[in-house]
Amino acid sequence: MLDEFFILRRDGLSLFHIRLEENSFTVQLPEELFAGFSSAIVAFTSELGAGHLSKIEIEEHIFVYEVMENLITVAKISIDDDETIAEHIVALLYREFVKEYQEELKNFDGTVRRDIFFPFADKVRKIVQMCENIVRNNPNLLANIPPSISIEAIEKLSNFSEELVDKFPEATIRMTRNFQKELPEEEMHYTMHKLGIEVGKDVAEKKIKKKTNDKAIMKILNEISICSCNDNIITLQICPFCRGRETKVFDCDFVAGFIEGAYNNPQISVREIACHATGDKHCQFQVFKISEM
């Protein structure tokens, strides 16, 4: 998944470096390869603001990096590795590094000491291992959840990912409600919608034996609640996903994503248009079908 991981200052000074396959800090990249990468990334980042994710390809390697304030976090992967997973790990490790070494970075005098940053190796190995386990259990989960979400929360969801489908709808409702509580408000809607799409695809694949159509989708949804569909508007009489919650904005992003994922058709999208959590009588979802527009 990752060959090496670096943390650099924006002036190019390396603060931390680990080569994961050998668990070593002493190994270095071939001089010409590192020099090419270092000079290129410093030049690029001088023009970038914080929060920018990008990559550089050099020979058979890809350097996935993120610029955040005065630091650059970098993962070196092989050209055949998954860049999306590397991007996720880069962002996660930046957050953990800054949290763990906040005071040291604030008072940094320019001298890189192994005894200060060396212990971060354990955190790198732990997070990389957790991400590998998540990808093994659910290949699409990391790609659909922002890296700002706690890796522990993602791992917990991943460990029970089979139950989301195999024990639908009881486990699906319980687990997604609990997971939603752990999400930051600004990323909750996006994350739950993406998760709903993936679960909807898997549930429909398991339950629909013939062609996917409106009737088959409604049969699945009626396992969740009493449902009806009129003029491409699906109504859940009692929505168990937002039951007991009061919000100012529509809250059932998972259900909208679930319906869209169950159709698994690029010409179909779904949006919530009424929500019991905001005071509406029922939760309703508009099904947009491009071919009918």
Image: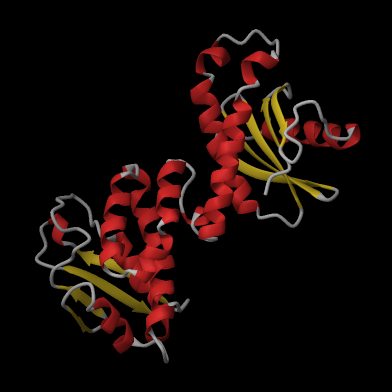
Residue at 82%, 30% in the rendered image: 27
Q: Nearer the viewer, residue 60 or 208?
A: 208
Residue farthest toward the bottom in the current orientation of the protein: 210
Pick the quarter of the image with the C terminus: bottom left
Q: Residue 29: name its quadrant.
A: top right
In this rendering, position of residue 88 left or right of residue 4: left
In this rendering, position of residue 27 left or right of residue 136: right
Count of numbered badges drawn on the protein: 0
Q: Nearer the viewer, residue 23 or 240?
A: 23
Residue 153 horizontal/vertical position (percent): 40, 45
Residue 114 horizontal/vertical position (percent): 69, 16
Q: Is residue 149 visible?
A: no
Residue at 63%, 29% in the rendered image: 121
Residue 108, compared with residue 15, is above or below; it is: above
Residue 162 horizontal/vertical position (percent): 42, 64
Q: Nearer the viewer, residue 53 or 108?
A: 108
Tell me which colouring the rendered structure shows.
Answer: secondary structure
Q: Is residue 185 visible?
A: yes
Residue at 40%, 53% in the rendered image: 157
Q: Residue 128: name its quadrant.
A: top right
Residue 266 horizontal/vertical position (percent): 48, 76
Q: Nearer the viewer, residue 220 or 273?
A: 220
In this rendering, position of residue 64 left or right of residue 205: right
Residue at 49%, 24% in the rendered image: 99
In this rendering, position of residue 123 left or right of residue 195: right
Q: Residue 152: name its quadrant.
A: top left
